[in-house]
Image: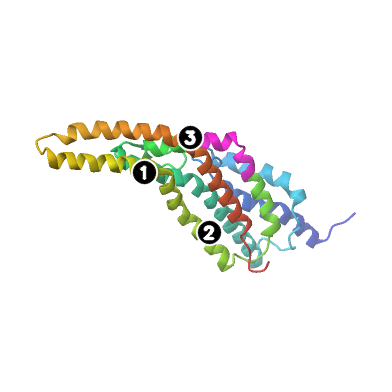
Amino acid sequence: MSFAYNDFLQWIGLYFYPFVRIGAMLSIIPLYGIRAFPARGKIILALFITIAAAPSIALPPPVDPFTWQGVLFILQQVVIGLSMGVIFLVVFQAFVVAGHLIAMGMGLAFAQMTDPTSGVTAPIVSQYFVIIVTLLFLALNGHILVLQVMIDSFEYLPIGTAFYTQDSLRLIFEFGSYMFLAGVLIALPAITALLLINISFGVVTRAAPALNIFAVGFPVTLLAGLVMLTLTTPVILPHMQELVHRAVETITHLQLTGS
């Protein structure tokens, strides 16, 4: 039994190109792409996922990865993997934006800590939201959904030299902008209540200028913010489900120029 060189290239491409896409997605996607997850672990995980998913992936064209066409194949996989990772990253960053808005209203914008997932500083309210969303995401098997979407992407985004269409790029950018809209919607009840409290303190200050409003206002806004956080926590789940649904829908609507 003998194999032709084209067959050999197809079998190499069946494992190498998906490995590049999966590795690019795992490098940025939440949970898998956190800084605490070592790079060696991500490579091993991407390798095992590729081996498990390869039998369900269509054979790519026989292209030598060391040619210009092979470089385009690799570049396509990197772009697709990173774009899908960014879409899922937006789901978590929407709650970070909501935490920023609530923290500014509470007066806790200065209380920041390092985010272990991204390595940047964020208000503690944002960290609280990220922890809750991460636990809910794991409880609802979101990490498995991410892998399923990743494997299914090889059906409607096949391996080749074609890149995203203009409509697909617009979908990605629009979903990125939706992060700010979702963050405002999540934080809207809390920031509305805190705004009314600040307005009421402004009226009190005009009526009684001798009153030390800073000594009274900060504890009240802080306490009101904690109460609003308690009331906002139960609505995190439906917001997260809506964001995940939109993320999956956006990825499934992505198309290539040649498809």
C-alpha span from label 2 to label 3: 29 Å
Identify the image quadrant of residue 156.
bottom right
Residue 203 coordinates in the image, percent (x, y): 18, 42
The answer to whether residue 188 is above or below residue 221 is below
What segment carries the magenta color?
Answer: 134-146
> Label 3: which residue?
234
Q: Is residue 164 magenta?
A: no
> Label 2: which residue?
172
Q: Secondary structure at mark 2?
A: helix
Q: Secondary structure at mark 1?
A: helix
- Image point 21% across, 39% down: which residue? 201
- Image point 69% across, 47% down: which residue? 50
Q: Is residue 144 magenta?
A: yes
- Dot 3 amino acid type: Pro
Residue 124 coordinates in the image, percent (x, y): 37, 36
- Dot 1 amino acid type: His
